[in-house]
Amino acid sequence: MTIRRSSNDRLALGALLVLAVGTFTVGTDGFVLNGLLPTIAADLSVSEAAAGQLTTVFAVTYAVSSPLIAAFTGRLDRRWVLGAGMLLFTIGMAGQALGESFAVVAVARVLAALGAAAFQSNAYVLAGALSSDERRGRALATVSAGMSVSIVLGVPIGVLAGNWFGWRVVMWGIGAVGVVVALLVPLLPAVRVPTVNLRDRLAVVVRPPIARVLGVSVLGTAAAFAAFVYLPVLVAPVAAGAMISWLLIGFGIGQIAGNAFAGRATDILGSARVRSISLGGTVVTLALVDVAVLSLPGALVLALASGVFGGMLMVPQQHRLFSLAPDAPTVALGLNGSAIYGGGALGAALGGVVLSSAGVWWVGPVAAFVALLAFGLALSSRAPVPQPA
């Protein structure tokens, strides 16, 4: 990997902040849809379970396109991939704002997902490339913080704006921030990574240690999405409308706390311990969903705890992949992005099936079971493994 970088540490920090704003933008789009689910469903004349599949469409597109984009753009400066990705994302946001039918909005979600896939995985690659080994966890956490802050600020503001002005205004607002990020991307340090074709990328995923880590990402994300996508339905007895924003703020504050802890703790304690704490806590919180949502204070505590444990997962996952694939970190992180969004698609679809066939009270237990599977797989991949030649 070759990097033309300034010796000025403030330039590196500035680059990380631009990347964090980009992940904030993508994260706001990904999560605000959940808070606006009833409004979108009513506007597009579909059920809430069907509207939730807009998350599935986004996630499947991201998961499939991420390795393909990386393979076909391998020779390009990462800045051009980041900038083009964010511009395509904003086109997708405009399409959602203008779409008058479920089909049109779904197609726009596909475009936004293609742009997000180009931007997000490369943002983490750039963060890892700009950091030293001993500070990589904190650099990754800085970029990941954009996702967490999107839940604390972007999602609640988006839900409130959606309730006041309509969900389409929210889509326009996210797109406007995306344009600003796209204009800032050319100012980042130039980074080129080793060219890796699609066959080589697929060869990385079949390495057993990497496959297990990616499996943890799939199952851990699926567990969270199975419940979180349908948050307005889960808490309907005690919270609705603007009150959903407060639950999302609680979740987002937890995400920031968990992400910040994970960045430093991974550098000190190692990725395996932090990952186990994250998944173990997620199992417990999801298992208690049906009890917690019986009261508003319980729902707030649940949202906060879910954010803390969920926010701890991806930093140790990314750190682990850097260690397991020193010969192809870009490939490993790109595949992890696919795993995250593939898990999101699986979780959103699973939650929709459970909601429509078994009822709202089974969503939490099913999500907890999926998290338990992730925890078991994580334990099986704790042992050190020999590095590839």
Image (cartoon, rainbow, N blue to C red):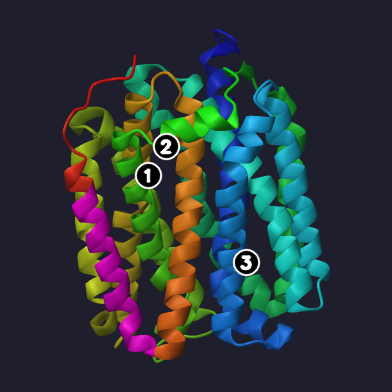
Classify 379 as above or below 302.
above
Which residue corresponds to mark 3? 158
Q: Could you give the CA–CA distance between mark 2 and mark 3, rounded to whole angstroms?
A: 37 Å
Q: In front of the other: label 2 or label 1?
A: 2
Circle 2/circle 1 CB separation < 8 Å: yes
Q: Spot the residue most to the top.
A: 7
Q: Residue at x 57, y 66 (%)?
A: 55
Which residue corresponds to mark 2? 205
Q: Could you give the CA–CA distance between mark 2 and mark 1, rounded to whole angstroms?
A: 8 Å
What is the magenta segment's predominant secondary structure?
helix
Q: Could you give the CA–CA distance between mark 3 and mark 1, rounded to whole angstroms?
A: 31 Å
Q: The disc labelled 3 sits on which kind of residue?
A: Gly
- Find numbered disc 1 in the image and state the secondary structure of the residue it sits on: helix
Which residue corresponds to mark 1? 214
Q: Quadrant of the N terminus?
A: top right
**Residue segment shown in magenta:** 358-377
- Residue 250 position in % (x across, y down): 39, 65
Q: Residue at x 57, y 45 (%)?
A: 23
